[in-house]
């Protein structure tokens, strides 16, 4: 190592302050100045890597971490950052080696074991993953991230009693609790008490969990309301047993409620098992006036009795796993177009919706005469379909809640816990949902071919069913 350079040290310290204050461009300039004067300053390489990683300059970030470790092999932060980046990029062999190296450097650090366990879960090495996560909790019983990661694994395995409990360690409900300032329901008797269900997840999750409202009423709650996304208000206001729906963008007084609960905690608080899931379908209805209006706009069954199939091929690009759960484009569904006796409708909104306006030649996709609008309007469209085929987005929950036939395309990587392992059906939507899973290759083409075959079989069976 070169002799200590005071000006390089000064530039590094300035960069660290700028980084902490969110002044990323200034921090990068300071770290590069430090490295220009002292190229063997490992900490500067590591910190510069963090800034580049934040900008999704992943190759450059990895190179910085590797340079830092070449200079100082025991620099734990660089080793952990490199491992995490490699895991995010699905470079699993390299990531595991980096995590194992980090374990050697700091074997008592629970975060290393938690991160390694989370990655092994994604790799479906579930026994190894569980061992890592439980070891992290032995080292630090209050390590919420390790407990959350273990909960995800257990819930995906269907080991719900412990899984639900571990899932209570997630961070967001604690922030909600501080915001609401009222008692958080912990499962004690509800008799005569008013309960506010607060959204702690996305639209589809709230549609999934609104099924618990009648059960909460049966448990004695005097009044049940939901505080959640505005786009759901018009539809979920009609949910059985729900007394009020409070949108995030409207003022309300939390103190009017005796207690509150996070939506995603309801299975735990209600003690749900595979045998006791509230799974009677449908548990939501579409507005019959809007259903009829959509039928009159071209969605009614045609004279040939063609199967009406809705398609959703992409999710919200902000979702942490959207690169894997979404199809690359509408073209990926091309094998479906050869199936006779089918009319296809796009229910794609947001990212990917522009593809539906100008589908490639040979793709018989019918455009809706009106946009989907909020979820009440989406439900009316869904009610006019015979089948929805979609990736794992809120749309599959809309279909399932309405009791509509729905086929879900599932990525192998980070499959959501509620779809469990290996099953081709879902206990949450019995009799209507079918799961089409990727194999370990992570390729969509074999999945779409299986869907096309199943669709051909369904379309061929329809005339006999209708007669």
Image (cartoon, rainbow, N blue to C red):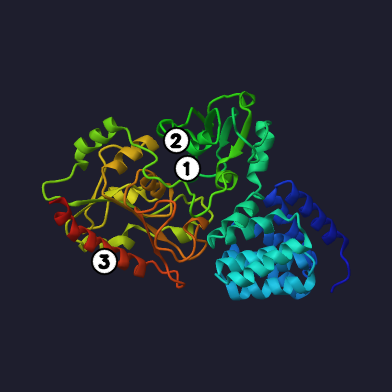
Residue 453's label in the rendered image is 3
| Quarter occupied by residue 111 | bottom right
Alpha-carbon distance for marks 1 and 3? 31 Å
Question: For the residue labelled by badge 3, is the local secondary structure a helix, a strand or a loop?
Answer: helix
Tag 1 and tag 3, C-beta contact below 8 Å: no
Residue 418 in the image: state x and y as whole percent.
Answer: 49, 55
Q: Nearer the viewer, residue 142 or 428?
A: 428
Within 10 Å of disc 2 (Cα), the crowding (few <14, some 14-19, many 20+) is some
Residue bearing the label numbered 2:
231
Question: Vertically, is 221 above or below 33?
Answer: above
Q: Earlier in the sequence, mark 2 or mark 3?
A: 2
Is residue 72 visible to us here? no
Alpha-carbon distance for marks 2 and 3? 35 Å
Question: For the residue labelled by badge 2, is the local secondary structure a helix, a strand or a loop?
Answer: helix
Question: For the residue labelled by badge 1, is the local secondary structure a helix, a strand or a loop?
Answer: helix
Q: Earlier in the sequence, mark 1 or mark 2?
A: 1
Within 10 Å of disc 1 (Cα), the crowding (few <14, some 14-19, many 20+) is many
Could you tell me which residue is drawn at 58 percent across and 69 percent down? 126
Could you tell me which residue is drawn at 38 percent across and 51 percent down? 352
Within 10 Å of disc 3 (Cα), the crowding (few <14, some 14-19, many 20+) is some
Residue bearing the label numbered 1:
203
Alpha-carbon distance for marks 1 and 2? 8 Å
Question: Vertically, is 43 above or below 222?
Answer: below
Could you tell me which residue is drawn at 55 percent across and 70 percent down? 123
Q: Quadrant of the N terminus?
A: bottom right
Q: Is residue 422 left or right of residue 263?
A: left
Tag 1 and tag 2, C-beta contact below 8 Å: yes
Residue 134 in the image: state x and y as whole percent.
Answer: 70, 65
Q: Earlier in the sequence, mark 1 or mark 3?
A: 1
Could you tell me which residue is drawn at 85 percent across and 72 percent down? 2
């Amino acid at each position: 190592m070169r002799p200590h350079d005071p000006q390089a040290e000064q530039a590094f310290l300035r960069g660290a302050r700028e980084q902490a204050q969110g002044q990323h461009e200034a921090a990068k300039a300071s770290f590069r100045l430090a490295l220009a004067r002292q190229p063997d300053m490992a900490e500067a390489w590591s910190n510069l890597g963090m800034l580049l990683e934040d900008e999704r300059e992943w190759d450059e970030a990895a190179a910085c971490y590797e340079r830092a470790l070449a200079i100082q092999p025991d620099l734990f932060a660089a080793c952990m950052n490199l491992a995490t980046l490699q895991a995010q990029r699905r470079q699993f062999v390299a990531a595991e080696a980096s995590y194992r190296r980090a374990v050697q450097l700091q074997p008592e650090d629970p975060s290393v074991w938690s991160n390694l366990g989370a990655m092994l879960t994604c790799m479906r090495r579930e026994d190894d993953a569980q061992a890592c996560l439980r070891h992290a909790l032995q080292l630090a019983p209050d390590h919420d991230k390790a407990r959350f990661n273990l909960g995800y694994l257990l819930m995906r395995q269907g080991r719900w009693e412990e899984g639900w409990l571990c899932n209570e360690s997630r961070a967001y409900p604690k922030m909600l609790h501080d915001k609401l300032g009222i008692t958080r329901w912990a499962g004690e008797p509800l008799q005569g008490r008013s309960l506010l269900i607060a959204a702690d997840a996305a639209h589809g999750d709230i549609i999934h969990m609104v099924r618990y409202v009648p059960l909460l009423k049966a448990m004695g709650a005097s009044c049940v309301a939901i505080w959640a996304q505005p786009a759901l208000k018009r539809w979920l206001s009609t949910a059985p047993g729900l007394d009020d729906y409070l949108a995030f963008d409207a003022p309300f007084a939390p103190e009017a409620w005796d207690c509150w609960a996070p939506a995603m905690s309801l299975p735990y608080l209600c003690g749900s098992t595979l045998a006791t899931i509230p799974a009677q379908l449908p548990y939501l209805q579409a507005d019959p006036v809007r259903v009829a209006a959509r039928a009159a706009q071209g969605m009614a069954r045609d004279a040939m009795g063609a199967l009406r199939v809705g398609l959703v091929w992409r999710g919200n690009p902000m979702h942490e796993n959207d690169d894997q759960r979404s199809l690359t484009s509408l073209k990926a569904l091309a094998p479906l177009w050869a199936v006779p006796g089918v009319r296809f409708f796009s229910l794609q909104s947001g990212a990917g919706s522009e593809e539906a306006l100008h589908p490639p030649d040979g793709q018989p996709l019918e455009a809706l005469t009106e946009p989907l609008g909020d979820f009440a309007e989406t439900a009316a469209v869904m009610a006019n379909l015979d089948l929805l085929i979609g990736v794992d987005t809120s749309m599959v929950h809309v279909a399932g809640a309405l009791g509509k036939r729905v086929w879900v395309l599932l990525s192998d990587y980070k499959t959501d816990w509620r779809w469990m392992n290996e099953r081709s059906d879902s206990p949450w939507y019995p009799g209507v949902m079918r799961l089409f899973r990727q194999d370990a290759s992570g390729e969509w083409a074999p999945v779409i071919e299986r869907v096309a075959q199943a669709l051909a079989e369904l379309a061929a069976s329809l005339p006999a069913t209708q007669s």
